[in-house]
Image (tube, grey):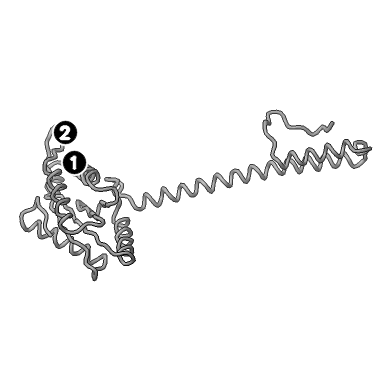
Amino acid sequence: MSRWTVPRGTTEMSAQERRLLDWVQRLEETGDNAGHPLMEEFRTLAAEHRKLMRQLTKIATISDRMHTDSRQMAQVLHAAAQTDPLTQLPNRRHMIERLESELGRIARHGGGFTLVMVDIDHFKAINDAFGHAVGDTALVETARILRQNLRGHDLCARWGGEEFLILLTQTDQEQAKTVAEKLRRLVDDHRMHVEGRDIHITLSLGIAAYRPDWTADACIQAADDALYAAKRAGRNRWAA
């Protein structure tokens, strides 16, 4: 019987190790091989080979784990690069990429979309009166209301400062008006309770439906122009 057995504490042996062990045992059990002067050297070489196989297996396992970790890290970094850290909404970069993708889809299959630019009214006054921490809470609360009241295939992104941009896919202007009014009303009816105070937030919204000759920049500019029309008309309303 071979002296080369599974080490103490080892519960599994790889297929390669098993074949190598069987080979050594067959050689030892064949004729006078067990007493051959080179047999001891062969056993040593076989043991070294087995040790090397175990080391290579560990290296392969570590390599696979590192590859998995690297892939997961890349996914986390990609998500972080496209997410606003305060509101956890998609950021401007994410929205632009999605808008370009939507324009490509329309070029291939037709259809349309509507953009809604959203701005928190008098946001500077909230910061000045209550502090930036309360202003941040206002942004987070507004983001939550917007996100929770859109369809799963729509996209709401923090565009910058107190502005948000909403992409309503497969939605015409009349349908977008209904959505904009719903969001305006929900925020208008909501009261934030911060440090014993009720804070009232209102929104102005600008609506722009896609036109076949528009680029992404043209769509965004049209929504922005409509937003400022809503502000000039008195705020806490939408314009198209």
Q: Position of residue 233 (x, y in %)?
A: 5, 57
Q: Say which element carries label 2.
A: loop
Quarter of the view holding residue 207: bottom left
Residue 195 is marked as 2
Quarter of the view holding residue 199: top left
How crowded pointer 2 is (Cα within 10 Å; few <14, some 14-19, many 20+) is rated as: few
Mark toward the start of the polypeptide (2 vs 1):
1
Q: What amino acid is labelled 1 in the image?
A: Val
Please say if 80 is above or below 22. below
How crowded pointer 1 is (Cα within 10 Å; few <14, some 14-19, many 20+) is rated as: some
Q: Position of residue 152 (x, y in %)?
A: 29, 48
Q: Is residue 15 left or right of residue 190?
A: right
Q: What amino acid is labelled 2 in the image?
A: Glu
Q: Position of residue 56 (x, y in %)?
A: 67, 45
Tag 2 near tag 1, CB within 8 Å: yes
Q: Which residue is mark 1?
A: 134
Q: Residue furthest bottom?
A: 213
Q: Residue furthest top?
A: 8
Residue 150 is marked as none
The answer to which of 211 and 77 lies nearer the viewer is: 211
- Residue that appears at 58% across and 47% down: 63
- Residue that appears at 15% across and 63% down: 225
User: Disc 2 and disc 1: Cα gap in Å?
Assistant: 9 Å
Tell me the quadrant of the picture where the C terminus can be found.
Answer: bottom left
The answer to which of 148 and 79 lies nearer the viewer is: 148
Q: Is residue 19 left or right of residue 204?
A: right
